[in-house]
Image: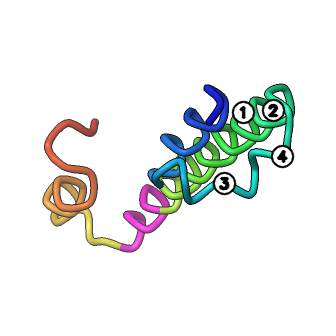
Amino acid sequence: MTTELDSLARRLSVPPDRLAAFAAYDGGQLAHLDTLLGTAMTQEDQAFDAGLEEALRFVPKLLRPAAKKLLFGGGHG
């Protein structure tokens, strides 16, 4: 397997042999796909966090700190 294919497999949290069908693509194409997936995953995480923040508007003010801790863990501002 190529380094690019290994990187793609790590990003997707799958064993590299699960992506054997992608071995036909050259390293540049795989690197581009890896970059696109990384960007999409980051945007998805940001959208999810924004949705959680928006949902907090519907929680009564006195309960928001507890809800934030539940939704985001202790480290979120």
Which structural element holds mark 1?
helix
The residue that mark 3 highlights is: 20
User: What is the C-alpha distance between the residues marked 4 and 3?
Assistant: 8 Å
Task: From the top left corner, tell me how far across and down residue 33 is, in percent.
Answer: 77, 41
For badge 1, the amino acid type reads: Thr
Q: Which mark is residue 55?
A: none
Q: Residue 53: which quarter of the image?
A: bottom left
In this image, 13 relative to 7: left or right?
left
Membership of 57 in magenta stretch = yes
Q: Nearer the viewer, mark 2 or mark 3?
A: 3
Marks 2 and 4, how far apart in space? 14 Å
Residue tagged 2: 32
Answer with mark 2 or mark 4, whichever residue precedes in sequence.
Answer: 4
Residue at mark 1 to residue at mark 3: CA–CA distance = 19 Å
Q: Quadrant of the N terminus?
A: top right
What's the amino acid at mark 3?
A: Ala
Q: What residue would you read off at disc 4?
A: 24
Q: CA distance from mark 2 to mark 3?
A: 17 Å
Q: Amino acid at mark 4?
A: Ala
Helix, strand or loop under label 4: helix
Residue stretch in magenta: 52-58
Residue 17: percent from left, percent from top = 54, 53
